[in-house]
Amino acid sequence: MLGLIADDLTGAGDASVQFAKRGWRTVVSWGLTPALIQGSDPDVVAVTTDCRALSNDAAEKLTADALTALMHAGAERVFLKIDSTMRGSVPGQIAGALAAWRTRHAAARAVVCPAYPRMGRTVESHQVLVHGEPVHRTSIGRDPVTPVKTSSMSDLIPSSPMIQIVDAVTDADLLQIAESISASGPSVMPVGSGGLAEAFAATVTLGSVRSQASRDLQRDRDLIPRRKNSRILLQVSSLNPVSHAQVVRVKATFPDVVVLLPPTERGDRVAVAANLAREFAEQVAREEWDILGLVGGDGARETLARLGASGIRIVDSLVEGIPLGVVVGGVADGTPVFTKAGGFGAEDALVQCVERMTRDA
């Protein structure tokens, strides 16, 4: 089994889906339980720590605890998913993952590359760029929760002989990095976003991956309804302007899609997420929905917990960086759900998702 740790739910989804696309049984969890593992029989388990906005010390402990749990569950390899723009407690996450992994591999080290070229994120001369612009000069530098104040990877991550920072501008660069990591064995931990996850999925091998997995995955895909009259409930908890431009487009194209948005006044993010989760759960309780959509990691995690879910079984990718799965457990058990990070995707990304979910198979 491969264990994947992410700092938020949407990140866990957009990284783990890279393995699902290759036929690996994949589940995203926020509370790793024996029942979830046994029921899903996964090849990949992605655990979200929700530590992006926390201190490095808190993130270190949560990440170490998450990886320790994954090791006890049978993880043979590990992937640490970080934000592609280096938001939040990345140093703490790396420190925690290395501390836990060194209990099994004394010489464990991390190879770090957050690049995701298909989403416009690259690392050039150890500088993080978004569509060619230094990240701290973009809207991410003004993020209301986790602003990135420098584009220098060397400044963002403390220097350490156990941490290697590498550049990547293209998918080919990432594939070369992943091939080197895979060939080095499990003591070397890949640290990156969905871009490196895709490359790693293409190169890593696990003894536990079964030939039956791809057939099971296709069965799950076939069970997901794709009808023109599907009822879709969409929640957007992200304050990123990218997401709100996408909402404008999807509402103009598909006015029947019901969209729940956060208040325009920026209040406490925890309270905002809780209020959205409560409203979303009430909608699910009152009416029947064919498809659920969750945009923004904090809100997605809070909402699924409110619904009593224990995880998401990832089955496909709707659009690059937007995984599709089914809810595991709770009142929405078995309901198709897609998740998206707030800053990901073109302006028509949500339109594309709805089109693909409502196109008759």
Image (tube, rainbow, N blue to C red):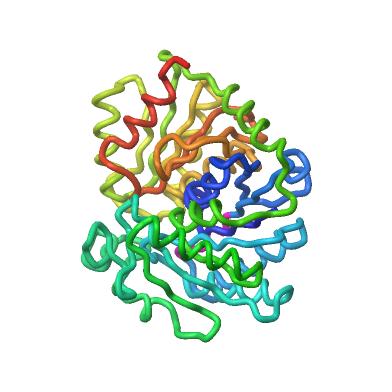
Span colored in magenta? 48-53
Residue at the (46%, 63%) spot, across then down:
176
> Residue 2, image x and y in percent?
66, 55
How many numbered discs? 0
Judge whether 315 appears above or below 186 on screen: above
Of 189 and 199, nearer the camera is 199
Of 95 and 296, nearer the camera is 95
Judge whether 234 appears above or below 156 on screen: above
Residue at the (30%, 70%) spot, across then down:
124
158 vs 19, left or right, is: left
**Does residue 11 show up magenta in the picture?**
no
| Main secondary structure of the magenta stretch | loop
> Residue 7, image x and y in percent?
51, 59
> Residue 30, image x and y in percent?
62, 51
Of 49 and 109, nearer the camera is 109
Of 201 and 359, nearer the camera is 201
Residue at the (27%, 60%) spot, across then down:
130
Image quarter of residue 354 = top left
122 vs 307, left or right, is: left
> Residue 195, image x and y in percent?
43, 55
